[in-house]
Image (cartoon, rainbow, N blue to C red):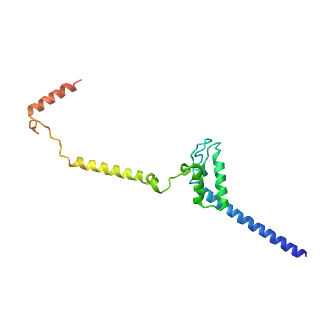
Amino acid sequence: MRLRAQKIIGLVLGGMLALGAVAATLRAQQTDRAKEIGGKLLCGIGTPLCDCKQILTQCNHVGCRNSAGMLKTLDAAIARGDSETSIIQGFVAEFGTAVLSEPSKSGLNLLAWYLPAATLFAGLLLVLFVISRWRKRPPLVASGPAVSSEISPEMMARARAQAARETQD
């Protein structure tokens, strides 16, 4: 009888240890998943208490009243087994699209992703176009009577004399 009781107690303790290990593994997975999903959300959006607008899982705003509640909501959704999409949609439904740390990659939000690169490319093309036009332009020619490229000796002498007068101390 005693041997049988010891076996039962051993089985019960072994089962409890196994359950504890499984629970610890699940908590670690939930924490990693919470960090991953929380990295896609902003803290303090749409609430008058705090407007820190930092990544939810990285909020270090002193006295932030929002991050604790939002993280608790996130952890509860993960514990229920909700999908990432449904969790994010829940936050969007509650706080609006401003809660997202990056715009979605669909619809009109595609402009936020592609417009900077397109603007840079268009500016580069414009600069290349202007430079090519400048290079093709003929050199400027003075209008009026024909200008001789040779300078007469007396003009050169007058210019040297004037330069000498102006540079004397």
Report x, y in % for residue 1: 91, 76
Report x, y in % for residue 21: 72, 65
* Total marks placed: 0
* 1 vs 47: above or below: below
Residue most extreme to the top: 169
Quadrant occupied by the C terminus: top left
Q: Quadrant of residue 39?
A: bottom right
* 142 vs 84: above or below: above
Q: Quadrant of residue 15?
A: bottom right
Report x, y in % for residue 17: 76, 67
Q: Which residue is painted at 78% across and 67% down in the image?
A: 16
* 12 vs 74: above or below: below
Report x, y in % for residue 89: 57, 56
Give the side of residue 149 with respect to residue 2, left or right.
left
Residue most extreme to the right: 1
Give the side of residue 17 with respect to residue 153, left or right.
right
Give the side of residue 96 with respect to residue 134, left or right.
right
Q: Nearer the viewer, residue 139 or 32?
A: 32
Q: Which residue is painted at 38% across and 50% down in the image?
A: 119
Q: Quadrant of residue 149?
A: top left
Q: Which residue is painted at 65% across and 59% down in the image?
A: 78
Q: Nearer the viewer, residue 112 or 17?
A: 112
Q: Nearer the viewer, residue 147 or 50?
A: 50
